[in-house]
Each structure stands twice: as C-alpha cells, then as structure tokens.
Amino acid sequence: MSGSPQPLIVAVAGSPRRGGNTETLLQAAVQGATEEGAQVEWVRPNLMKFVACQHCGGCSATGVCVVQDDMQAVYALIERMDGMILASPIYFGSVTAQVKALIDRAQALWVRKYLLHRPLSEDGKPRPLLFLSALGGRSRGHIRAARTVVRAFLNTWDGEYQELIFPRIDLEGEITEHWTALPQAHAAGQEMAARLKHSP
Ligand SMILES: Cc1cc2nc3c(=O)[nH]c(=O)nc-3n(C[C@H](O)[C@H](O)[C@H](O)COP(=O)(O)O)c2cc1C
C-alpha cells in the first residue's frame, strides 16, 4: 500500500439543488483537495440514470452487479478511488433518495466483502469517506439516522469516516453565511488529499 502524488477522490453531489448548500460545501472541499494535488471525479446521482437495487440476486455469486446502467461507472470509480467526499442534505432523517438509491446499489460490494470475503480491489487499501451535510432543523435523531446510512455505505469497503454536518441551514445559499462552514470543508478536503498522498 502506498500513497499517490495525485490521489483520486470521488465527489458525490447528492442534492438535486444545483449550487445549494451541500454542493457549496462540496465545492469548497474539492477545492481544498485539488490544491493538495488530488484528482477529482464528480458523481451527480440526480443526473444519472440508474435503478435502485432490485434484490435480483445477480451479484450473489460474484459481488458484481449485473444491472447495466449508470451505476456501473460508479462501481468502477469506487474500485479505483482513494477516497470519497459525499455531500447530501438531510431529507426526512436520511440522505436524499438519489443518494440512498446509489447506496442501496452498494449491495454488490456488501456481498463481495461480507459473503465472498473478497477485497474491493487487489491493493486492499482503505478508502476514507468525508460526509458533508446540512439540514434545515437541528434534530439529533435525523443527524444520527443519516450518519448511520452513510456509515453503512462506507462499511461495504473500509476506511476512516469523517463528517461535517451543519444544522439550521435551509435557504438556498445560506451555508455561505455560516462563519466557518466553507473554510472547514476546504480544510477537510485538503487534509484528506494530504493524508492520501502520504499514506504509507
Ligand atoms: C424533501 C425535503 C426533505 C427535507 N427533510 C429534512 C429533514 O428531515 N430534517 C431537516 O432538518 N431538514 C430537512 N430538509 C431541509 C434541507 O435539509 C435543507 O434545506 C438543506 O439545507 C438543503 O440542502 P441543499 O441546498 O444542499 O439541497 C428537507 C428538505 C427537503 C426538500
């Protein structure tokens, strides 16, 4: 296992609201990561064509999803990536439906890890995940529930979990009025890239 001078970070923009609060956070994190030399691939579930998991069993012997849609590109990215930054607002105490559909398709990765005991890729490297979120209210239950979903996603591979979640952020663009949110997201992206560059 060795660090890469140009780690690959997958940036998932999980809100349907373009330029909204979580996408603004994500842009700040991506900016930090690229300043540190990372290469970034964007994934926009809201613009992609894929179905939610059909529980068809097509992955049960191989850990490879047989459904040929836009998720195939995401699987390929997850296998290649060094880390992920996942941005989603909290919708009804979870991530958005678009992100949840993407996460459910990680069932193939779950099968690979837990049933077939096969690593995601030959290198077996950990892939950290940074969760960026905002919610209009401040319900701890909603935050806890969304965190549980994202951590379950991360558990389909392995890596460190980190989060920045901002309550009481509702109106479009409101995150820019928060004193520390964007610098925090920028620093978190920068730190992720720096750690990936220097990982042993
Ligand atoms: C369908 C929907 C469901 C929402 N559910 C919640 C919720 O459960 N709890 C909460 O605090 N805010 C909720 N919100 C508010 C959003 O989390 C909030 O507006 C957030 O800042 C939106 O981020 P974005 O600009 O990145 O889309 C919801 C908003 C929508 C549109």
Image: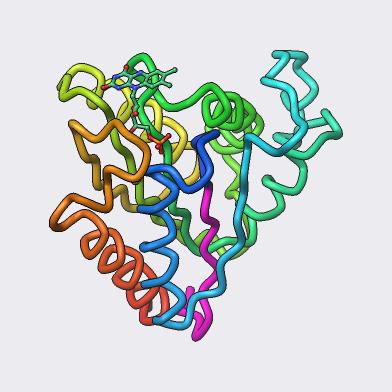
Give the answer, above or below, for where 179 lies relative to 60: below
The foreground one among 92 and 84 is 92
Give the answer, above or below, for where 122 lies relative to 118: below
Quadrant position of the C terminus in the picture: bottom left
Give the answer, above or below, for where 145 lies relative to 30: above
- Apparent side of residue 13 relative to residue 186 in the rendered image (left or right): right
Colour mapping: rainbow
Residue located 70% across and 34% down the image? 63
Residue 155, position as x, y percentages in the image? 43, 37
The foreground one among 159 and 166 is 166
Residue located 51% across and 36% down the image? 17
The foreground one among 194 and 55 is 194
The foreground one among 159 and 40 is 40
* Residue 10 magenta-highlighted: yes
Residue 127, position as x, y percentages in the image? 45, 57
- Apparent side of residue 39 relative to residue 144 in the rendered image (left or right): right
- Apparent side of residue 103 relative to residue 160 in the rendered image (left or right): right
Residue 110, position as x, y percentages in the image? 56, 31
Residue located 48% across and 26% down the image? 96
- Apparent side of residue 63 relative to residue 130 in the rendered image (left or right): right
Residue located 39% across and 44% down the image? 22
Which quadrant contains ligand 1? top left
Q: How many marks?
A: 0
Q: Quadrant of residue 56?
A: top right
Per the rendered image, the range of residues in magenta is 1-12
Residue 42, position as x, y percentages in the image? 60, 56
